[in-house]
Amino acid sequence: MLSDWLVIRVSANPGESFLDRMIAMVEGAKRHKTPNEIALDILLAALTLVFLVAVGTLLPFSAFAAGVAHAGSPVTLTVLVALLVCLIPTTIGGLLSAIGIAGMDRMARANVIAMSGRAVEAAGDVDVLLLDKTGTITLGNRQADGFLPAPGVTPESLADAAQLASLADETPEGRSIVVRAKERYGLRERDVHALHAMFVPFSAQTRMSGVDLDGRRLRKGAAEAVDTWVRSLGGTFPEPVRAHVNEVARRGATPLVVSDGPSVLGVIELKDVVKGGIRERFAQLRRMGIKTVMITGDNPLTAAAIAAEAGVDDFLAEATPEAKLALIREHQTGGRLIAMTGDGTNDAPALAQADVAVAMNSGTQAAKEAGNMVDLDSNPTKLIQVVETGKQLLMTRGALTTFSIANDVAKYFAILPAAFVTSFPVLGALNVMHLATPRSAVLSAVIFNALIIVALIPLALRGVRYRPLGAATILARHLLIYGVGGLVAPFVGIKLVDMLLVALRLT
């Protein structure tokens, strides 16, 4: 307790509070698998299924050949198991976890806590970035800079009403209004307890806050919200005040309108500052093919001014939590992957829905729990590094998948001739590696299959170097380096293992 009194507000409609609605929207949000994840899952499942069916049919085929065609002894179950182990995608399957752990480690070194490797990999596919304005694009400490009264209202009266409406407002904006009125007009020593005031907290729906005292109903908030409030009480919104609102918005500041019941008293000008260097960072994101969208509760004029100064591609003004969530789902329905940064409780539903959700460490607990990453430095442009790391993980996974598939092709020449040479001696012609015996060939392939996974772990952890190249160029590089390497390595490796087994007389 900071004072000797406590005011408790009990809602008559449970389940309809701001927090209840945020929880409901977070629970309804759901992240989906990225196209790359789906493609890899299908590839691994398809290869596994194909090899299971193929190996499963080899035993009756071999038994038929041995029993009916008298072509020799049938293949043994041990050889078939070895064939299956070597041919199914064990290499990439065994290395996927290492790739994800490596991505989380890189993020940790960049002061970003990633909840899973999947979250980091998803960042590599992102093509739309949504950023909350206050505290993310701007410094977030908007300060009252001036009072613009309505016709017939003195600046002192406007400042007095604005200060009264802000006494219970613990935000930086609210405190700055109290301080500004105190410094400029000497309004001080308010006895809040003696006022017997009923304070009205700010909400994302009403977009207003204020106080009821001595028969007065003082409100401050967005121009549209105050306009609706005043009209509901039978008042009108003066055109000179609307002109003040537009003028403040065009300067990139935030206008707050103050009213006393049905009477509009004037405008408070709040100034915020765009973070240094952020325009260049957004330009870098644009070169990476990522569209940036600023989300703000400000009116369209203020949003447009800040968006132009920051260099974002688009903006959503007067955004509610529902509007943010709807915007993300609209983009996702169009097949786009969304990343979002945010720090407030009202950002939590959108963060829970976004494919990559980076919550600021300086933000609320709700935002951090809804995200799948937390930036300890609270720097929204850190997403550039997150995206680069995600793309590096995708390139690493692509390189290792290419190597794994090429690796399986080469293993055919080691295991298949050895497996069926007793049934079909003519297959001995396919023993291009001149392996010592069928038993040695199978054993060498299994040992090599285990060793190659261990040998590739450093590459999975270190990752393929990220270069901002096109998909066709990256594919050509992978085929040349990892495809050809995957074909050559088994021939060399299996032959060396076979020679070692022969030298040790293990076959």
Image (spheres, rainbow, N blue to C red):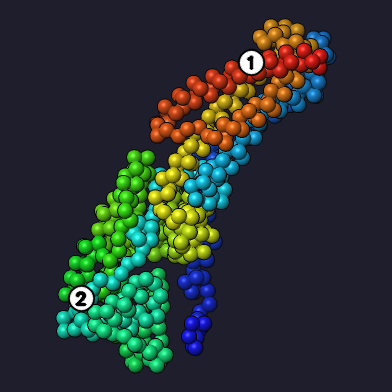
Q: Amino acid at mark 2?
A: Leu
Q: Quadrant of residue 342?
A: bottom left
Q: Which residue is mark 1?
A: 492
Q: Secondary structure at mark 1?
A: helix
Residue 30's x, y, as percent? 53, 54
Residue 362's x, y, as percent? 46, 61
Residue 148 is labelled as 2
**Nearer-the-camera pick, 92 or 489:** 489
Residue positioned 53% across, 51% down in the render: 113
Residue positioned 40% across, 93% down in the render: 194
Crowding near the residue tagged with mark 1, few <14, some 14–19, many ≥20 C-alpha atoms within 10 Å:
few
**Nearer-the-camera pick, 261 or 181:** 181
Q: Quadrant of residue 67?
A: top right
Residue 501 left/right relative to 34: right
Residue 105 higher or lower than 57, as above or below:
below
**Nearer-the-camera pick, 123 or 279:** 279
Residue 356 is labelled as none
Residue 488 higher or lower than 330, as above or below:
above
Q: Amino acid at mark 1?
A: Val
Q: Quadrant of residue 45?
A: top right
Residue positioned 80% across, 24% down in the render: 77
Would residue 431 be visible to someone looking at this image? yes
Q: Secondary structure at mark 2?
A: strand
Q: Are marks 2 and 1 in contact (CB under 8 Å)?
A: no
What whole-number distance in Å separates the C-alpha atoms at marks 2 and 1?
A: 81 Å
